[in-house]
Amino acid sequence: MSETWIPSPSLPSPKLDSGYAGWVKNNLFSTPGNLLLTLLSIALLVLTVPPLLRWGILDATWLGDSRGVCDEAAQGGSTGACWVFVKVRWGVFLYGFYPLVERWRVNFTFFVLAVALFPLFAPILLGTTKRKMVLYLLAAITVLFWLGPIPATFIACYLFAPFALDRLLQGKPFLELFGNQVVAVLTGIGSALLVGVISYYGIFLYLDEKAAGAIGLTALVLTLFLLFISRLTASGWHWVFLFTVYPVFAFFMLVGDIFGLPLVETHFWGGLFLTLVVAGSGMATALPIGILLALGRRSDLPVIKVLCVSFIEFVRGVPLVSVLFMASVMFPLFLPENVTFNKLLRALVGIAFFYAAYMAEVIRGGLQAIPKGQYEAAMALGWPYWKMMSLIIIPQTLRLVIPGLANNFLSLLKDTTLVAVIGLLDLLGVAKASMADKEWLGFTKEAYIFAAIVFWIFCFAISRYSVYLEKTYHPSHQ
Amino acid sequence: MNVFKTLAVASAVSVCMAGSAVASTLDAVKEKGYVNIGVSGKVIGFSAPDAQGKWTGLDVDFGRAVAAVIFNDPEKARFTPVAFKEAFTALQSGEIDILSRNTTWTYQRDTKLGIDFVGTIFYDGQGFMVKKSLGVTSAKDLNGASVCTQAGTTTELNLSDYFVSKGMAYKPVVYESADEATVIYDTGRCDVYTTDTSGLAARRSTLGNPKDNIILPEIISKEPLGPAVRQGDQQWSDIARWTLFAMINAEELGITSQNVDEMMKSKNPAIQRFLGVDTNYGEFMGLTADWAYRVIKHVGNYGEVYDRNVGPATVLGLERGVNALWTNGGIMYAPPIR
């Protein structure tokens, strides 16, 4: 008798665990406990999502521009949201009390920021100079048709000047000319001062004396950058512009009283615009200050170290509300009579320093993770402190602490709502104040939900961006 | 405001420490070109921005009246929302020039806090709202009721005082915000909702079925709401006080924003004095002769302002009640201008 050997696997074929059915089985119904949880979750979703959709979208009133539309809908038995409430207040929610005819200035300021930031924040997407040029050209043309030739000229100069500056000077001209380090440095500073003074008087005499100081100073700083940091790429110049030219531009654009723009005092700022101003300037100033504080705390110089440690520990010991309250209400009590600082400025400074202290500690955590060998290698090459820090240590540190920094940025954005305690109406403040309008009573849900959605969009964007940064710059740690 | 200039001035002053002459509030206000009014910013009918972002309300109109008196332009008033906790500090520090924030005039606030109340713009008082279906017609029937209210206000204390003094039991249901408390009341979690009557009427209009709710006749507390100024500047406090009195007097004299120009020709000596036809009473306060005319021309008399913001035609629907003139059975009474 011979048996035929039929080959068969020693184990039965695995149960179906691929495809949708497999995924569902493995993840949702694998154990009785999981089964129960799944059923509970489905029940919860069925209970909450359809009513929410009905209220927010299907039954909601979208069209019209008066309260009557919503009242009619409500009398007709509709229980949906009244988004007309948000629609008629759109301008107030976005710009606060900024005068209607001047709102293009806010739009333009943020448009310039968006166009300037996009290539810097997404270098993979717009890596090549050609693509950037196309984007910038499109932006300039858009502005030309939208606002006219003067704004278009400004945005074109702002966006294309970095490319020109990049080509302007290669190497160290004065060092080559004089061959002496000291003479070269002095000449450099001298020519920067000269440029600053010339632009100051040029603006003072021919344009507007109020802008002269700020523009002269900006020109001086730019010249210093040009002469002393010679190997700056076009992207580097864009960053420099963002921290030198842009703040000056944004200040004059938003505040006005210059170049024929009417004055709009910060008292009239509000809504989402104010939220973004507070959050944006807070982020842009807190991070650099935080880096300096973190370095100061690890410094070998005792005075600097003690100052930084005590500042950080003091600020971390008090809540932000009390900082804002001090800045807004107590601070003027200590000033001589008739001397006032702008209230918004005080709040901005308060928030920037508050968050700088937190970021300093996050960055210090990153600094501690950098191996000693990195420092030693840089020192062995004879690199001075600032060169070592800015080119070797800080870039690695920032990469390490992206999640922590994103956390701080997010809480900064949300904490901007605290400016309500000092009488500034940000998005949430405007929404709350709108609830008391006697023509539009009873739409609290709509106001809160609108504010929540806007905040969520910004926060989610920040958190996704931090994930993108981690993936791009830190693949080995994923 | 030019920040750089401010910085320069600030550093110059702090370096020199030159003692600057203490200027009067009126001069300071004239110099900066606007008067800064602290408002609550979210009380229906008293101060709130409308859909276009323009401030409206009784408290707001008083601020406009002060601006009209000084600048002949009601738009020279700026409104800064101040929270209750910082309101008095903001006034003392000069952050705001006048506090017009539906604040109750009480002994302690007037004497202890370094501020002066200049009058009463609205006599309020705490009341109760119940569902009609409860069958209650008087607050004395509320024994054992659950009462919704807002936390940390005098409302809560008045409520306890009232029920204790009447020997009745109650169950407080306390919420952080008035909005929340109203919603909870509407869902039927509590029988009674209590707050100042001005607020009750407004809240009632936001309920699902406003007509199913009634406001009980009992008023259990005195809440005279009025504007306040910093202590120590008598001229400024006079300006605020007499702006309010001018609004009340104008109603008594029958001068409205509509007929004020015709009234200039009136033979009535009281009206002539009021409008400064051939007297200059404004100079005693450092103002112009037509100071009262400006209030009425730009803002209106007390009755107009009341009707516009909280009166029967508005969503609050408040009858004049105690806020009627003394000649009409109310207690609104202003000293004569002579």
Image: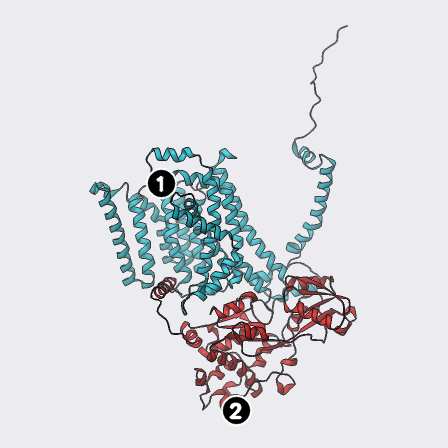
Amino acid at circle 2:
Ala
Question: Would you say residue A208 is visible in this rendering?
Answer: no
Residue B26 lies, in percent from the top left, at 44, 77
Which chain is red in the rendering? B
Residue B49 lies, in percent from the top left, at 55, 67
- Secondary element type, mark 2: helix
Tag 1 and tag 2 share a subunit: no
Where B293 falls versus B135 (above or below)?
Answer: below
Q: Which residue is outermost to the right?
A: B135
Instruction: Say which residue appears at 60% left-offset and 61% top-offset.
Output: A84
Coloration mode: by chain
The residue that label 1 is drawn on is A385
Where A440 falls versus B294 (above or below)?
Answer: above
Rendering colour (chain A): cyan
Along the viewing direction, whichever of A417 and A443 lies nearer the viewer: A417
Along the viewing direction, whichever of A396 and B69 lies nearer the viewer: A396
Indicate the quadrant where residue B322 lies: bottom right
The residue that label 2 is drawn on is B270
Instruction: Say which residue appears at 73% left-offset and 38% top-offset.
Output: A33
Question: Would you say residue A147 is visible in this rendering?
Answer: yes
**Chain of residue at mark 1:** A
Callout 2: 10 Å neighbours few (<14), some, many (20+)?
A: some
Q: Nearer the viewer, mark 1 or mark 2?
A: 1
**Chain of residue at mark 2:** B
